[in-house]
Image: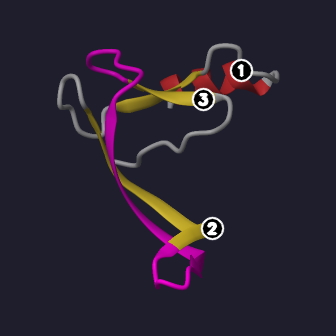
Amino acid sequence: MTVPALTAETRWRCTLCSNLTRFDVTRTARVTEFLHFDLAGESKVEETEVLSETIESVRCRWCNAVDQVELVARPGAEGPGAADTAVAAEQG
């Protein structure tokens, strides 16, 4: 099952228990990081650029359902497409 990607106007909701806030996400990411080392050799990531990312699975923390998420509009989401995106995800 394909996990729907989040946008600025949408968020996940578990279709089984309606959870909106707690998910375990397994993802694979390819990133470029700028590391800054201090004189003692300790490193700190100062910049991260995500080159590609794949969400492999999403598990609901409340009911333990795997890949049972849908996209819904975020409260106060701006733009006319926010509601359309949520409806399309529900129908889809």
As helix, strand or loop, the secondary structure at mark 1 comes to: loop
Closer to the chain start, of discs 3 and 2, is 3
Q: Name the one closer to the observer, 92 or 36.
A: 36
- In 3D space, how far apart are the residues under numbered discs 3 and 2 (Cα atoms)? 28 Å
Q: Is any atom of residue 14 visible in this view? A: yes
Q: Are the residues at dot 1 and dot 3 in contact (C-beta closer than 8 Å)?
A: yes
Q: Nearer the viewer, mark 2 or mark 1?
A: 2
Does the magenta segment cover residue 7? Answer: no
Q: Against 52, is 64 above or below?
A: above
Q: Badge 2 is on which residue?
A: 46
Query: In the rendering, at what x and y percent does residue 56 appear?
Result: 35, 56
**Left or right side of 26 for 46:** right
Q: Which residues are magenta?
A: 14-43
Crowding near the residue tagged with mark 2, few <14, some 14–19, many ≥20 C-alpha atoms within 10 Å: few
Crowding near the residue tagged with mark 3, few <14, some 14–19, many ≥20 C-alpha atoms within 10 Å: many
Q: Badge 3 is on which residue?
A: 10
Q: Badge 1 is on which residue?
A: 77
